[in-house]
Image (cartoon, rainbow, N blue to C red):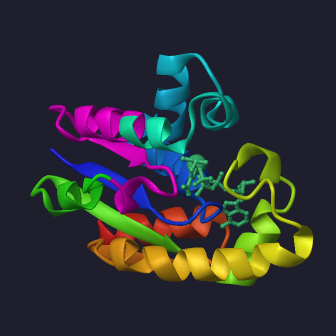
Amino acid sequence: MRKIVLIGYMGSGKSKIGQLLAEKLDFPFYDLDFLIENELEKSIGEIFSEEGEVFFRKKEHEVFKKVIESNESYVLSTGGGTPCYANNHLFLANEDVVSIYLKASIPVLVSRLKNEIDKRPLLQSLKDEETFEFIAKHLFDRSYFYNQCKYSVLTDDKSPEQIVAEINALL
Ligand SMILES: Nc1ncnc2c1ncn2[C@@H]1O[C@H](COP(=O)(O)OP(=O)(O)OP(=O)(O)O)[C@@H](O)[C@H]1O
Ligand SMILES: O=C(O)C1=C[C@@H](O)[C@@H](O)[C@H](O)C1
Ligand SMILES: [Mg+2]
């Protein structure tokens, strides 16, 4: 049994790469944000604005725990904050988990996210000129958790297909 768990900052490509990797491996694909949205029948934006971030983090922990303790192989794309709250990072040490940190530089994250800010409630209220510094500090704070992954893959200047091939070779 192999649970391939993709970790990384918003815009690092977890959802995009996870879907392609699952197709390549012929594994089921789960996206934690989609699982939460389906369960609550609300978008991530609505959950943050109507219920608040703490409610979201508790639900994220509950759904993550359920998936990580299930008895099957899969590719799981986590949310950008998943390993950073509620001791979720401890599950990354499980024997059946292969955790992969998708790394991207700050300018690349900013450029990937610039047309998708409306889908990321934590970035929504920032002015354009504040985004770079916010992401730099946020990534710095979160790196301790991201760096606990078994593998790290650099994603700057690589197509999704190249990244999937690189991960496949690691596995
Ligand atoms: N290697 C890549 N090259 C170019 N664009 C990419 C690459 N990886 C992802 N993208 C694009 O960047 C955007 C963000 O990717 P994605 O939604 O997969 O990020 P994420 O890590 O799942 O973010 P979140 O934590 O917010 O869910 C998408 O438009 C996606 O198509
Ligand atoms: O980095 C984060 O904390 C988040 C990332 C997204 O995947 C969503 O889980 C949500 O927008 C929060
Ligand atoms: Mg995603």
Residue 65 located within the stretch drawn in magenta: yes
Residue in the foreground of this view, choosing between 32 and 45: 45
- The magenta stretch is 59-85
Quadrant in the rendering for residue 44: top right
Residue 87 magenta-highlighted: no
Residue sitting at 57 percent across and 38 percent down?
A: 52
Relative vertical location of residue 10 with respect to residue 57 in this rendering, above or below: below
**84 or 64: nearer the eye?**
84
Q: Position of residue 86 (x, y in %)?
A: 29, 52
Residue 163 in picture, x, y percent from top left: 54, 68
Q: Quadrant of the N terminus?
A: top left
| Quarter of the figure that contains the C terminus | bottom left
- What residue is rendered at 40% in x and 33% in y? 59
Q: Determine which quarter of the picture holds residue 148.
A: bottom left
Left or right of 169 on screen, residue 157 = right
Of residue 92 and residue 88, the one placed in the foreground of this image is 88
Residue 31 appearing in the image = no
Q: Which residue lies at the image location 43% right of the left edge and 61% below the top edge?
A: 7
Residue 39 on image: x %, y %: 47, 19
Of all residues shown, which one is farthest toward the left?
A: 95
- The answer to whether residue 165 is visible is yes
Is 77 on the left or on the right of 51, as rendered? Answer: left
Q: Is residue 59 above or below residue 25?
A: above
Residue in the picture at 57% in, 74% down: 138
